[in-house]
Amino acid sequence: MDKSRPTIIETLDLKKVYGVGDTQVNALAGIDIKIVEGEFVAIMGPSGSGKSTLMNILACLDRPTEGKYILAGEDVSEYDRTELAYIRSRELGFIFQSYNLLPRLTALDNVMLPMMYQRENNVKVEERQGKAMAALQSVGLAERSHHVPN
Protein backbone atom coordinates (compact mmCIF):
# COMPACT_ATOMS: atom_id res chain seq x y z
CA MET A 1 0.00 0.00 0.00
CA ASP A 2 1.34 3.42 -1.00
CA LYS A 3 1.10 5.76 2.00
CA SER A 4 1.62 8.83 -0.20
CA ARG A 5 -1.80 8.37 -1.82
CA PRO A 6 -4.90 9.51 0.07
CA THR A 7 -7.12 6.97 1.80
CA ILE A 8 -10.46 6.73 -0.01
CA ILE A 9 -12.20 4.05 2.08
CA GLU A 10 -11.47 3.06 5.66
CA THR A 11 -13.46 0.97 8.09
CA LEU A 12 -12.72 0.61 11.79
CA ASP A 13 -14.19 -2.34 13.70
CA LEU A 14 -17.18 -2.37 11.33
CA LYS A 15 -20.04 -4.58 12.53
CA LYS A 16 -23.47 -5.37 11.16
CA VAL A 17 -26.05 -7.38 13.08
CA TYR A 18 -29.42 -8.39 11.66
CA GLY A 19 -32.36 -9.45 13.83
CA VAL A 20 -32.97 -9.13 17.57
CA GLY A 21 -32.62 -11.27 20.68
CA ASP A 22 -32.00 -14.96 20.01
CA THR A 23 -32.39 -14.49 16.25
CA GLN A 24 -29.39 -12.17 15.80
CA VAL A 25 -27.06 -12.82 12.88
CA ASN A 26 -23.60 -11.25 12.91
CA ALA A 27 -23.11 -10.47 9.24
CA LEU A 28 -19.92 -8.47 9.88
CA ALA A 29 -17.83 -8.89 13.01
CA GLY A 30 -15.20 -6.15 13.27
CA ILE A 31 -13.96 -5.44 9.75
CA ASP A 32 -10.92 -3.17 9.36
CA ILE A 33 -9.95 -2.18 5.81
CA LYS A 34 -8.07 0.66 4.21
CA ILE A 35 -8.18 1.39 0.48
CA VAL A 36 -6.04 4.15 -1.00
CA GLU A 37 -6.62 6.13 -4.18
CA GLY A 38 -5.90 4.09 -7.31
CA GLU A 39 -5.84 0.76 -5.51
CA PHE A 40 -7.85 -2.16 -6.93
CA VAL A 41 -9.45 -4.43 -4.35
CA ALA A 42 -11.44 -7.65 -4.66
CA ILE A 43 -13.81 -8.66 -1.87
CA MET A 44 -14.00 -12.43 -1.93
CA GLY A 45 -15.33 -15.17 0.29
CA PRO A 46 -17.81 -18.03 0.51
CA SER A 47 -21.56 -17.55 0.39
CA GLY A 48 -22.83 -16.03 3.61
CA SER A 49 -19.48 -14.53 4.64
CA GLY A 50 -20.73 -10.92 4.56
CA LYS A 51 -19.51 -9.71 1.15
CA SER A 52 -22.86 -8.22 0.11
CA THR A 53 -23.40 -6.70 3.54
CA LEU A 54 -19.99 -5.04 3.40
CA MET A 55 -20.58 -3.80 -0.15
CA ASN A 56 -23.97 -2.35 0.84
CA ILE A 57 -22.31 -0.40 3.63
CA LEU A 58 -19.41 0.75 1.45
CA ALA A 59 -21.92 1.84 -1.20
CA CYS A 60 -23.85 3.87 1.40
CA LEU A 61 -26.93 1.71 0.84
CA ASP A 62 -26.91 0.56 4.48
CA ARG A 63 -25.39 1.63 7.79
CA PRO A 64 -23.20 -0.38 10.15
CA THR A 65 -24.56 -1.46 13.53
CA GLU A 66 -21.24 -0.47 15.10
CA GLY A 67 -17.87 0.84 14.01
CA LYS A 68 -16.84 3.58 11.63
CA TYR A 69 -16.94 3.96 7.88
CA ILE A 70 -14.80 6.82 6.63
CA LEU A 71 -15.28 7.74 2.97
CA ALA A 72 -12.75 10.22 1.55
CA GLY A 73 -11.97 11.50 5.04
CA GLU A 74 -15.62 11.87 6.08
CA ASP A 75 -17.21 9.63 8.72
CA VAL A 76 -20.48 8.53 7.11
CA SER A 77 -21.23 5.77 9.65
CA GLU A 78 -24.21 7.47 11.24
CA TYR A 79 -25.58 9.41 8.30
CA ASP A 80 -29.32 9.14 7.79
CA ARG A 81 -30.93 7.95 4.53
CA THR A 82 -31.05 11.44 3.01
CA GLU A 83 -27.40 12.11 3.77
CA LEU A 84 -26.39 8.70 2.40
CA ALA A 85 -28.38 9.34 -0.79
CA TYR A 86 -26.55 12.63 -1.25
CA ILE A 87 -23.16 10.92 -0.81
CA ARG A 88 -24.19 8.23 -3.35
CA SER A 89 -25.19 10.87 -5.88
CA ARG A 90 -21.96 12.88 -5.50
CA GLU A 91 -19.16 10.52 -4.51
CA LEU A 92 -19.92 6.97 -5.66
CA GLY A 93 -20.46 5.13 -8.90
CA PHE A 94 -21.86 1.65 -9.28
CA ILE A 95 -21.32 -1.19 -11.71
CA PHE A 96 -23.92 -3.80 -10.88
CA GLN A 97 -23.39 -7.50 -11.52
CA SER A 98 -26.64 -7.56 -13.49
CA TYR A 99 -25.85 -4.21 -15.19
CA ASN A 100 -29.20 -2.55 -14.36
CA LEU A 101 -29.24 -0.72 -17.69
CA LEU A 102 -32.53 0.55 -19.02
CA PRO A 103 -33.25 -1.57 -22.11
CA ARG A 104 -34.93 1.19 -24.12
CA LEU A 105 -32.12 3.71 -23.63
CA THR A 106 -28.94 3.83 -25.67
CA ALA A 107 -25.56 3.31 -24.01
CA LEU A 108 -25.05 7.08 -24.12
CA ASP A 109 -28.42 7.77 -22.48
CA ASN A 110 -27.80 5.11 -19.80
CA VAL A 111 -24.47 6.75 -18.92
CA MET A 112 -26.06 10.22 -18.89
CA LEU A 113 -28.94 9.16 -16.65
CA PRO A 114 -27.23 9.60 -13.24
CA MET A 115 -26.23 13.17 -14.17
CA MET A 116 -29.90 14.02 -14.57
CA TYR A 117 -30.59 13.09 -10.94
CA GLN A 118 -28.00 15.38 -9.37
CA ARG A 119 -29.67 17.98 -7.17
CA GLU A 120 -27.63 20.95 -8.32
CA ASN A 121 -27.66 19.90 -11.95
CA ASN A 122 -27.13 23.06 -13.93
CA VAL A 123 -25.30 21.19 -16.66
CA LYS A 124 -26.62 21.60 -20.18
CA VAL A 125 -27.59 18.54 -22.20
CA GLU A 126 -24.65 19.04 -24.56
CA GLU A 127 -22.19 19.01 -21.64
CA ARG A 128 -23.79 15.86 -20.17
CA GLN A 129 -23.53 14.20 -23.58
CA GLY A 130 -19.87 15.19 -23.82
CA LYS A 131 -19.06 13.78 -20.38
CA ALA A 132 -20.98 10.58 -21.09
CA MET A 133 -19.27 10.10 -24.46
CA ALA A 134 -15.86 10.64 -22.82
CA ALA A 135 -16.73 7.96 -20.24
CA LEU A 136 -17.79 5.52 -22.97
CA GLN A 137 -14.63 6.30 -24.91
CA SER A 138 -12.47 5.64 -21.84
CA VAL A 139 -13.79 2.06 -21.69
CA GLY A 140 -13.71 1.45 -25.44
CA LEU A 141 -17.45 1.75 -26.08
CA ALA A 142 -17.73 5.06 -27.93
CA GLU A 143 -18.56 3.31 -31.22
CA ARG A 144 -21.52 1.63 -29.47
CA SER A 145 -22.91 4.81 -27.89
CA HIS A 146 -26.16 4.63 -29.87
CA HIS A 147 -26.75 0.91 -29.27
CA VAL A 148 -29.28 -0.32 -26.72
CA PRO A 149 -28.10 -2.84 -24.06
CA ASN A 150 -29.30 -5.95 -25.93
Image (tube, rainbow, N blue to C red):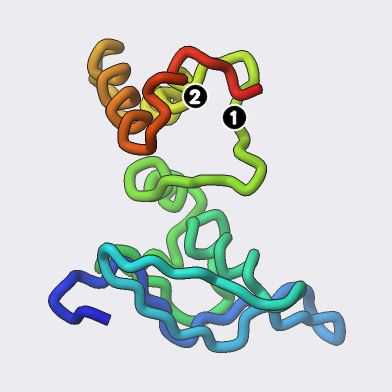
Q: What residue is shown at x 49% (from left), y 57% (from top)?
A: 59
Which residue has dot 2 on it?
110
Q: Amino acid at mark 1?
A: Leu
Q: Quadrant of residue 77?
A: bottom left
Q: What residue is shown at x 66% (from left), y 42% (from top)?
A: 98
Quick check: 74 left or right of 88? left
Tell me the CA gap for discs 1 and 2.
6 Å
Q: Earlier in the sequence, mark 1 or mark 2?
A: 1
Callout 2: 10 Å neighbours few (<14), some, many (20+)? some
**Does 21 sit above or below residue 10?**
below
Residue 133, given in percent of the width and then of the height, sits at 32, 23
- Tally the numbered discs: 2
Residue 136, given in percent of the width and then of the height, sits at 37, 29
Quick check: 20 left or right of 79? right
Quadrant into which the C terminus falls: top right
- Residue 77 is labelled as none
| Element marked by disc 1 | loop
| Element marked by disc 2 | helix
Q: What residue is shown at x 42% (from left), y 28% (from top)?
A: 141
- Residue 101 is labelled as 1
Q: Amino acid at mark 2?
A: Asn
